Image (tube, rainbow, N blue to C red):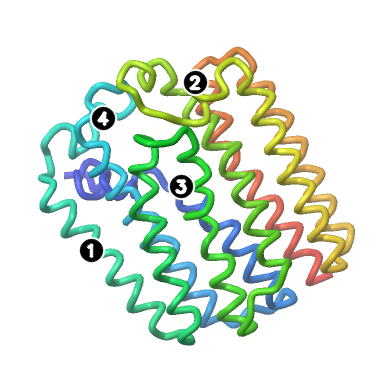
């Protein structure tokens, strides 16, 4: 069997790596900013491995939460829990195995960072269920995806400065923007099955609200660039990323599912460009 066809691989989204990178980029931003461009290789290794483990765990618990509704949504109808390829019991065993591996990694760091890791676990567990109770599951996803940021600063500096929280907030804005694009793909199906999201809440004003969160993201990233006295490479990368954000606005204008999904995927490139600018700013 092709490994991409293995139901456990698909449950962890190993066949769809973009999500890994969307979680990885802000973690790398934090590693470079917190360490003036020279992060400890061991800490980098711990967090990069942690990103992949926690993203896989997040996908498993997300599908567990959605196992009874995924079958009614076209995009998710063939997910392993929805089709019965994997049982709920085995999915939970896999989830706890993944978070245990992630926790073993964190144990190599200081006790303050270990303490912060419990918040990461709580966010990973509660996020999938928020779409039942609030129209802002994207905010919880942003917090879950961004919690590595304060952990990175604590592991690197022994404290969490204001800049760490600004970067965390910037990441939340970015995640709300791109995950709303993602939710636009399932808009009609989500209405039918009663799933809540920012896309459902914003409705026909999705472009406006996504644009507003994009502007807040870039405003915060500009402020961080000035705070850290980064050079023109960083700001050039930010300008290029902003051009991509404008392109995303064009893609989602007519609410075509394929175009909205393309805009979502393209955010991987946006995150990469910012990171490249950041690295060049510290090495030039």
* Quadrant occupied by the C terminus: bottom right
Which mark is first along the chain, 3 or 4? 3
Query: Does 237 sit left or right of 204 as displayed?
Result: right
Q: Nearer the viewer, mark 4 or mark 3?
A: 4
* Quadrant occupied by the N terminus: top left
In the picture of the structure, the residue carrying the numbered disc 4 is 70
Q: Secondary structure at mark 4?
A: helix
Which mark is first along the chain, 3 or 1? 3
Q: Front-most of 40 and 102? A: 102
Which mark is first along the chain, 2 or 4? 4
In the picture of the structure, the residue carrying the numbered disc 3 is 19
Up-down relation of residue 121 to residue 176 (above or below)? below
Query: Does 269 sit left or right of 186 as displayed?
Result: right
- Does the residue at mark 4 contact the one at mark 2 (Cβ under 8 Å)? no
Provide residue 79's location: percent of width, then percent of height: 24, 35
Spatial CA span between label 1 and label 3: 20 Å
Q: Front-most of 178 and 164? A: 164
Provide residue 183's location: percent of width, then percent of height: 47, 29
In the picture of the structure, the residue carrying the numbered disc 2 is 258
Q: Front-most of 155 and 264? A: 155
Spatial CA span between label 1 and label 4: 22 Å
Which mark is first along the chain, 4 or 1? 4
Spatial CA span between label 4 and label 3: 19 Å
Query: Does 248 sit left or right of 16 as displayed?
Result: right
């Amino acid at each position: 069997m092709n490994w991409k066809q293995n139901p456990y691989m698909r449950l962890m989204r190993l066949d769809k790596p973009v999500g890994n990178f969307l979680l990885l980029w802000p973690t790398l931003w934090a590693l470079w900013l917190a360490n003036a461009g020279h992060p400890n290789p061991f800490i980098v290794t711990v967090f990069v491995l942690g990103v992949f483990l926690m993203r896989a765990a997040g996908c498993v618990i997300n599908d567990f939460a959605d196992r009874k509704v995924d079958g009614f949504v076209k995009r998710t109808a063939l997910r392993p829990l929805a089709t019965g390829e994997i049982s709920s019991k085995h999915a939970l065993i896999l989830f706890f195995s993944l978070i245990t591996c992630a926790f073993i990694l964190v144990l190599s760091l200081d006790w303050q960072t270990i303490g912060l890791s419990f918040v990461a676990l709580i966010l990973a567990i509660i996020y999938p269920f928020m779409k039942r109770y609030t129209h802002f599951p994207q905010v919880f996803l942003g917090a879950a995806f961004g919690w590595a940021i304060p952990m990175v600063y604590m592991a690197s500096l022994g404290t969490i400065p204001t800049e760490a929280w600004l970067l965390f907030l910037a990441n939340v804005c970015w995640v709300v923007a791109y995950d709303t694009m993602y939710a636009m793909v399932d808009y009609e199906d989500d209405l039918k099955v009663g799933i809540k999201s920012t896309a459902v809440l914003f409705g026909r004003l999705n472009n406006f609200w996504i644009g507003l969160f994009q502007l807040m993201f870039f405003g915060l990233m500009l402020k961080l660039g000035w705070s850290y006295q980064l050079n023109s490479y960083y700001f050039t990368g930010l300008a290029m990323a902003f051009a991509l954000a404008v392109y995303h606005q064009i893609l989602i204008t007519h609410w075509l599912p394929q175009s909205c999904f393309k805009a979502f995927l393209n955010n991987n490139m946006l995150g990469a460009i910012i990171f490249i600018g950041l690295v060049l700013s510290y090495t030039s």
